[in-house]
Image (cartoon, rainbow, N blue to C red):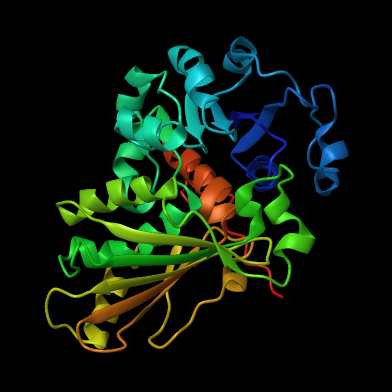
Amino acid sequence: MQIRVGIVGGTGYTGVELLRLLARHPGARVTAITSRAEAGMRVDALFPNLRGHCELSFSEPDPAALAATCDVVFFATPHGVAMDLAPQLLAAGVKVIDLGADFRLRDPATFARWYGMEHRALDWLEKAVYGLPETRRAAIREAQLIANPGCYPTATQLGFLPLLEAGLLDPHSLIADTKSGASGAGRAAKLPNLLCEAGDSFSAYAVSGHRHQPEIEQELSCWAGGEVRVTFVPHLTPMIRGIHATLYGRLTRDIDAADLQVLYEARYREEPFVDVLPPGSHPATRSVRGANVCRIAVHQPRPGQVVVLSVIDNLVKGASGQAVQNMNLLFGLPEAMGLEDVALMP
């Protein structure tokens, strides 16, 4: 028996990435995909790469119809959509995985500050499980509502996590210098993301405050055992896919580079989607393109300092691939099912 899957908001990059991954998933089949703007259009007319893999047409997002035909529904929608529609599905016993931000921040006041709206599903906000499998695998298996992490937070958390768990980082010294491909801004046409604007250029944005910062600090604080503060600076790079996070911190005690390497290798030895590279490595975003994997390298330029390099594909491990990973856990499937694709090179 296959899991019946619905996708709300299937016309964006995370939506089509879900369709690509699920097309070859042996334990799931997509039974519904919604879009108000494209209702009635065949999916493969909008996304020709899915010809022969998806025979569905987009439909209006109807919670009753989704509840009748789906075991799990992914929300690949802007913030504010899932909090209004998901409670109806959850009340009907359907599992929900939200790729947006509606259920990531546990404090509704923090959500209102960063997203400019009051939270409208507070009961479910309290029940939501943050879906980073490397930290909450057991809770994910028992959940009904999963808040899929953001792309920058995924790369940043996986990079800092072993050091914070071991109490080796000054929690107020952390710097996350991050770069993203243009697909991270979504499929809607925006002037800064046009080829003539973004090509042959490199720029920072949201330096005074980015919505992913409170998510990063919330989760890292859980594993540090106290408040963590991160200087978070995102950049737009002239590429389509990829996140590269260069992470800096001050160590709280003497530890050499070899022991740092051992720490990372031990923490992630059993993790199917985190690859700790050999000493001296410099991971590139192209090494994870199209794959649900985070590659990490740890460096110590001088005593007392640590630099971690963390790369992911923002649409896969940073979004849709991680969402499928969470689905596998929710339904007791092998965690790597449907996610074994090798990264694309060149």
Q: Which quadrant of the rendered structure holds the C terminus?
A: bottom right
Residue in view at x 75 percent, y 55 percent:
194
Can residue 271 be spotted in the picture?
Answer: no
Q: Which quadrant of the rendered structure holds the N terminus?
A: top right
Q: As rendered, which of 107 and 259 lies closer to the eye? A: 107
Q: Is residue 269 left or right of 200 when viewed as pictured?
A: left
Image quadrant in which you'd find residue 241: bottom right
Q: Is residue 42 left or right of 74 when viewed as pictured?
A: right
- Where 158 falls versus 315 (above or below)? below
Q: As rendered, which of 164 and 132 lies closer to the eye? A: 164
Image quadrant in which you'd find residue 55: top right
Q: Is residue 41 left or right of 36 when viewed as pictured?
A: right
- Tell me residue 215's x, y (percent): 36, 46
Residue in view at x 56 percent, y 76 percent:
284
Residue in view at x 69 percent, y 73 percent:
345
- Tell me residue 79's x, y (percent): 52, 32
Residue in view at x 31 percent, y 45 percent:
136
Can residue 329 be spotted in the picture?
Answer: yes
Q: As rendered, which of 199 and 332 lies closer to the eye? A: 199
Q: As rendered, which of 327 and 64 lies closer to the eye? A: 64
